[in-house]
Amino acid sequence: MFWESVLIAFDGLKANKLRSILTMLGIIIGVGAVIAMLSVGKGVQQKVDSAIASLGSNLLIVVPGSNSPSGGVRLAAGSNITLTNQDAQAISKEINGVNAVAPAVRQQFQVVNGNQNWMTQVQGSTTDFLDVLNWHVASGSFFTIRDLDSRARVVVLGQTVATNLFGDISPVGQTIRINKAPFRVIGVFEVKGQSGMGQDQDDIAVIPLTTAQDRLLGITYVNTISVQAESGDVINQVQDDITALLRVRHRLQPNVPDDFTVRNLAAIMATAQETTNTMTIFLGVVGAISLVVGGIGIMNIMLVSVTERTREIGIRKALGATFNNILLQFLIEAIVIGVTGGLIGIFTGLGGAQVISYVTGWATVISWTSIVASFGVSVLTGLFFGLYPARKAALLDPIDALRYE
């Protein structure tokens, strides 16, 4: 009886092809929208996570506070001169739970190789720069403690700078000029790509901190101090300890605000993940609404089918069909619409995700969870919205059904 009911259901759908396709359209659009929108949401979430993670793991960034001249305009955070290399060394030695510390200074300079030049960010840092900020050298090497102590004129280039100055030629061993001073290229970084704000992270040149301070900028302070905590479990405690230590070192009274800011990238990542999760849920709900609309369409068409086939139902009941036989027949018809629409919707969603990625340039991540969930919902939608029409058909009185015109 089950397979006979399936065949009867398919015969009923084939008898009204256009009506069946239009009924399925709501399910197709709903399933496709859920898959496509969730893939966009997952893609955005992955991009944000990778962009923040590329800055370094378990990372805290200490920046100077804002400069507030007496009677003047309050400037942006980081405009004050309050952090020194000695602060960085104190954090490294006195704070528990710290893996590595990388103080840094930075400024835009024109770098020149022969008749080629490029404006880039020149950054001075220490040997912990690679570990703290998750950088890797693709060719050559990074500078050493000896280079720091001797204020050596050596530089490691990002891929963007290396390409613009040297093209396809390896820059390692070559000499470039930064602010008219000669620097020997000792290495080239691996490609890091864009940051979460769309900035080119490979547009950088890194030199020893002492060289940048004494020979290039003529300063004694640092712009930032990047701190890598041992794990995410201790990062909040490390942040509090750094704040307490720097307040003591800067001799700040209890009623005086901090002259620095400690930024916790783990907290930023958690906030970003919460935001992207909310967006993904919102997109999924928008797609799910289409499924509900498709389900209402199934109910509508099944009610029409029950009305059209009232005499058929009466004849089947007169020949011995039971309540369950009639109920099963119409339920299967509704489920067939849901299953067929769901399968077509899966391919529509996969294609839609690819089109969105191609047209907008957004990354899309398609998960089996979204495919299985949307298909399951489409089947349940057919079952749920087909239940009332099927029950109505099964409850018809055979005498009234045979009289129906």
Image (cartoon, helix red, strand yellow):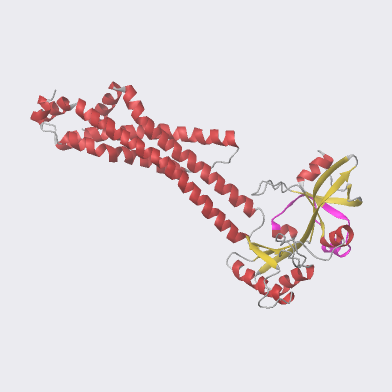
Q: Quadrant of the C terminus?
A: top left
Q: At x 27% / y 24%, what residue is drawn?
A: 11
Task: Judge from the rendering whether residue 193 lies leftward or rightward of residue 5; answer left or right.
Answer: right
What is the total number of numbered labels drawn onto the structure image?
0
Where residue 258 sits in the image (x, y, percent)? 68, 70
Q: Quadrant of residue 327?
A: top left
Q: Kindly tell me whether residue 314 is visible in this rendering.
A: yes
Q: Residue furthest front?
A: 71
Where residue 211 sits in the image (x, y, percent)? 86, 60
Where residue 305 sits in the image (x, y, percent)? 24, 28
Q: At x 30% / y 33%, what residue is drawn?
A: 298
Q: Quadrant of the N terminus?
A: top left
- Seen in the picture, residue 110 relative to 270 is either above or below; the reply is above
Q: At x 52% / y 55%, what residue is drawn?
A: 274
- Seen in the picture, residue 38 relative to 186 is either above or below; the reply is above
- Residue segment shown in magenta: 133-155
- Seen in the picture, residue 289 relative to 14 is either above or below; the reply is below
Q: Kindly tell me whether residue 366 is visible in this rendering.
A: no
Q: Residue furthest left?
A: 399
Q: At x 58% / y 40%, what residue is drawn?
A: 362
